[in-house]
Image (spheres, rainbow, N blue to C red):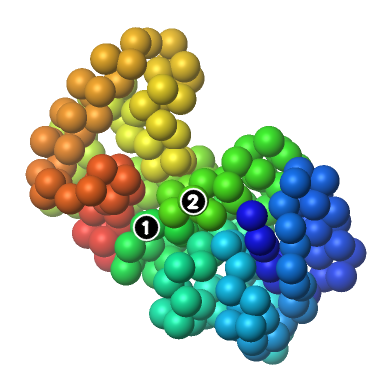
Amino acid sequence: MRLIVAEDSLLLREGLVRLLQEAGFDVVGQAGDADDLVRKVLAHKPDVAVIDVRMPPTNTDDGLRAALEIRRQCPQVGVLVLSAYVEEAYAHELLAHGAAGVGYLLKDRVFELQRFTEAVRRVGEGGSVLDPDVVTQLLRAGRGTAHSLVQLSPRELETLALMAQGRSNVGIAEQLVVTDRAVEKHVSSIFTKLRLDPVPEDHRRVLAVLRYLRNSG
């Protein structure tokens, strides 16, 4: 899987590149600012761009803006955005036009190497990944909306959080120590209670969280 790594801190960027290369990824380019990132993605067409949210030229949300531009110009390129802290608006913007090939993780997850590399692979394969802390904040944001999550049972809420992290039904079953069939029933119930239309499965899994993000504003 071919990657581009965008991070303005040279030390952290080199560390990320080394970790990813040792995990078997082919890092075909590096960028230290948002403009250079977009240029290199257009030139190399990687499978995934791993992007820091805060980058030059303004050191605010330039990385996020670059990720959105990449999604617009090269929708086949996955984007995995890294942020130092949870920012609900970032998750909203990233996922507003589709969840396939999109990820949002806190930077601390980089040090959980297996989880980090699994996230990169999932995004590169067209899946979606949300950091557990992001999921928690989105769930809390949804509690005061007209279509509140209070209608979900505690087990369904746990299942929803794991779904939004990109876990498969098998992975959820292992985490919750229940059968695959039990997870299937929870997932079906979540879709029903949230009144999600019958769209592709991977999209519905993320829409189960996004519905409340969109309604919370």
User: Label 2's element?
Assistant: loop
Label placed on residue 99: 1
Label 2 CA crowd tier, 10 Å (few <14, some 14–19, many 20+): some
Of the pair 18 and 7, the residue shown nearer to us? 18
Can residue 136 be spotted in the picture?
no
Q: Residue at x 65, y 76 (%)?
A: 44
User: How far across and how far down the image is residue 53, in percent?
Assistant: 61, 69
Residue under the point 51% across and 67% down:
77
Q: Which residue is mark 2?
A: 125
> Does 7 sit above or below residue 168?
below
Residue 205 position in % (x across, y down) = 30, 43
Residue at (18%, 30%) from the top-left corner?
188
Above or below, comparing residue 158 to residue 192 in the picture: above
Could you tell whether 143 is left or right of 171 in the image? left
Q: Is residue 21 left or right of residue 157?
A: right
Residue 212 point in image, percent of width and height: 26, 52
Whether residue 39 is situated above or below residue 205 in the rendered picture = below
- Hey, which residue is sitting farthest right in the picture? 11
Nearer the observer, 103 or 149: 103
Choose the circle earlier in sequence order: 1 or 2: 1
Disc 1 crowd, CA 10 A, few/some/many (<14, 14-19, 20+): many
Determine whether 177 is above or below 53 in the image: above
Q: Provide residue 68's location: percent of width, then percent of height.
A: 47, 76
Nearer to us of marks 1 and 2 is 2
71 left or right, relative to 212: right
Residue 56 lies left or right of residue 185; in this view the side is right
Quadrant where the C terminus lies?
A: bottom left
One can see residue 177 in this view? yes
* Amino acid at dot 2: Glu
Separation of marks 1 and 2 at Cα, in angstroms? 12 Å
